[in-house]
Image (spheres, grey):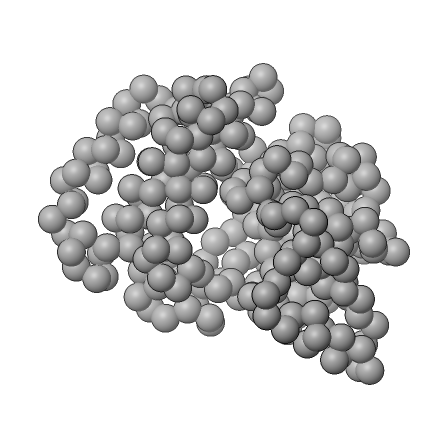
Amino acid sequence: MIVSDNGSSDETAEIAVSFASRMTIRVVDAGGAPGSNYARNCGVRAARHQRILLCDGDDRVDADWLTAMSRGFDEGHQLMAGPIDYVALNPAQVRAWRGADRASTGTILNFLGSGHGANLGFTKSLWNELNGFDESFEFGGPDIEFCWRAQLRGTPLHTVPDAIVHYRLRPSLRKLYKQSRAYGAAEAHLYQKFAQFGLDRRPASAPIVDLWWILTRLPFAVAQGRRGAWLRRLGQQIGRFEGSARYRVLWW
């Protein structure tokens, strides 16, 4: 096991090292730059084996996760992803902000499928062929970008239904809003990179529909149970505008 420490300010490294007597574990210093892709590249680069599995530090893998993913490698798959469960680690109110209890692999932005970076498996040879994760995607869309490039080069994305990761959602409205803005900006970044491969621009009516939804539901945003869903939609739309300006594309 490799722990890629992306500038943690707690006792992550010390806790990881404390398990050394029970398992083979290494801590890699990935504090040289911000972003999950930099940390993932540092970790994969340090790996000595061909089979790579990713999960995030604040999540929890299911008891059968490793077995299920290993079976996928045995079947010859080079790129795999499993479902993300929101129930185990999050209270009902936080899950309501997301609007779902589980997420799985699926088509993103009506283009290609993608897995979640917290539950991803691939071969190191595939990672080498793709020159790793694109570190310009610092805070949104890094897993999507990687999965899309792999599929465009001919490597299919295989879903492993039994490989479940229990994912910890953002626990506060402020963090949810910040994450949603990053996701919206990442959509524009993805469009900048993949429009040449067939990713279509959002319909002209899409921002109008989104803004109408945001404005008409503003009175309900004072209710704690509904505020998260409203802020998530607002943050994502603001992020799209910001991303359009940052990456010089029209993605509203």
Query: Residue 43 lies in what quarter of the image?
Result: bottom right
The residue positioned 47% from the left and 26% from the top of the image is 246
Q: Nearer the viewer, residue 83 or 174?
A: 174
The answer to whether 20 appears left or right of 15 in the picture is right
Would you identify the image quadrant in which residue 125 lies?
top right
In the image, residue 69 lies at what x, y percent? 71, 59
**Residue found at the very far top of the displayed protein:** 196
Identify the residue at image location x=53%, y=44%.
139
Q: Residue at 33% of width from left, 68% of height from top?
A: 92
Residue extending farthest right: 48
> Residue 31 location in percent, x, y?
68, 54
Q: Is residue 159 visible?
A: no
Identify the residue at image location x=60%, y=20%.
Answer: 197
Q: In this image, 185 relative to 166: left or right? A: left
Which part of the image, by quadrant, shows the C terminus?
A: top left
* Tally of numbered discs: 0
Say if 81 sits above or below 153 in the image.
Answer: below
Residue 25 seen in render: yes
Q: Nearer the viewer, residue 225 or 40?
A: 40
Q: Toward which corner of the image does residue 134 lie, by quadrant?
A: top right
Q: Is residue 7 above or below residue 136?
A: below
In this view, the residue farthest toward the bottom is 21
Rendered view: 156 above or below 222? above
Residue 107 % position (x, y): 51, 38
Q: Nearer the viewer, residue 186 or 70?
A: 186
Which part of the image, by quadrant, shows the N terminus? bottom right
